[in-house]
């Protein structure tokens, strides 16, 4: 499949710097989930390590490409969440991982080229890990490159962000997104893009997963609660059992639709009895609950408290 059109400008700029031998020692790839940051990373690193690249694109057949595709290239390490001693996956990237990474980057390249490491998600580093990374960024070794990926870069210390060449992947124009969605076979691209808040990659994922049906279910659930026909506890359990963060995303969307309808004197899609201020408060609470689901709080209680406030 061809690369998405919103990657082209970033790709051309990096390849221009590569030709001038002016690549940075640290990159920070930022943007919402679904815009292809990880595909861009893989394509770029693969081409950088390739022994016979063509305008930055990997040949796919040299020894370096074969090792990279097998996940065994000695000059590339991909860091993500590690495992605790009890075998459970960590929820953050810790300092020991960064120390190991620094030691790895200090060794010589086995292919006499770049030593590359990626950290994904870089916004999951704890404070100690970020401090350890800062030292590596301040004293980069020759022919080494760190590539950080972050959906939420504001979670990272400013000292880290300022030492990286930042590449932002903003939402592309609607026309570009719709054309691409149609090219990759998404039916009802307009509805899928609207559900994903203008994010074409997310629209494609959700269309393939049937999430648009789930969006309609959320709308029906909130309309039922507003009409006094729903059971908040039953809905909370059902939402928790099926992609709760995604359902909260859709809940915030449909409440925003309700607020727009009120502001333009149109028919209320949910029939809520709350005023504009109350809807705004609930919208903010839904987004906070989506964030809180990633933490230690009980999801069932979060959802019950939120749905119990909907009228």
Image (spheres, grey):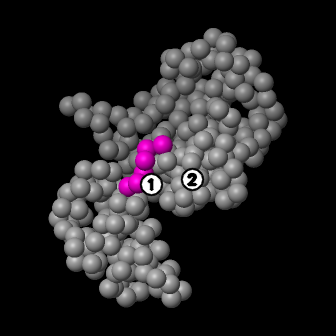
Residue at disc 1, secondary structure: helix
Residue 90 placed where, x, y %?
A: 30, 40
Query: Relative to residue 241, is residue 65 drawn left or right?
Result: right
Corner quadrant of residue 286: bottom left
- Let me know if residue 211 is in the magenta part: yes
Magenta stretch, main secondary structure class = helix
Q: Dot 1 corresponds to which residue? A: 212
Quadrant into which the C terminus falls: bottom left
Corner quadrant of residue 270: bottom left
| Image point (62%, 51%), residue name | 169
Numbered tag placed on residue 188 in the rendering: 2
- In the picture shown, does residue 153 fall above or below 89? below
Of 98 and 233, nearer the camera is 233
Report the span colored magenta: 208-214
- In the picture shown, does residue 102 fall above or below 270? above
Quadrant into which the N terminus falls: top right
Query: Relative to residue 222, is residue 74 drawn left or right?
Result: right
């Amino acid at each position: 499949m061809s690369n998405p059109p919103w990657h082209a400008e970033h790709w051309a700029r990096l390849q221009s710097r590569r030709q001038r031998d002016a690549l940075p020692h640290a990159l920070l790839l930022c943007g919402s989930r679904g815009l292809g940051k990880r595909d861009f990373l893989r394509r770029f690193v693969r081409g950088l390590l390739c022994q016979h690249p063509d305008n930055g694109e990997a040949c796919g057949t040299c020894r370096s490409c074969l090792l990279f595709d097998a996940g065994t290239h000695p000059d590339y390490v991909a860091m993500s969440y590690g495992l605790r001693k009890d075998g459970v996956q960590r929820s953050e990237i810790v300092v020991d991982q960064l120390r190991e990474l620094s030691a790895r980057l200090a060794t010589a390249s086995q292919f006499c080229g770049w030593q590359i490491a990626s950290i994904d998600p870089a916004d999951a580093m704890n404070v100690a890990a970020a401090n350890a990374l800062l030292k590596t960024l301040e004293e980069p070794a020759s022919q080494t490159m760190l590539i950080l990926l972050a959906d939420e870069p504001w979670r990272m210390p400013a000292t880290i962000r300022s030492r990286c060449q930042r590449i932002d992947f903003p939402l592309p124009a609607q026309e570009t997104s719709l054309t691409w969605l149609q090219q990759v076979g998404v039916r009802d691209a307009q509805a899928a893009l609207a559900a994903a808040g203008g994010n074409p990659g997310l629209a494609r994922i959700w269309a393939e997963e049937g999430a648009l049906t789930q969006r309609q279910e959320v709308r029906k659930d909130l309309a039922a609660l507003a009409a006094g026909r729903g059971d908040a506890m039953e809905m909370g359990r059902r939402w928790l059992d099926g992609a709760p963060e995604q359902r909260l995303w859709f809940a915030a969307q449909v409440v925003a639709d309700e607020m727009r309808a009120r502001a333009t004197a149109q028919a209320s899609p949910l029939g809520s009895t709350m005023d504009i201020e109350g809807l705004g408060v609930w919208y903010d609470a839904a987004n906070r609950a989506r964030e809180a689901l990633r933490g230690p709080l009980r999801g069932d209680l979060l959802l019950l408290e939120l749905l119990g406030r909907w009228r």
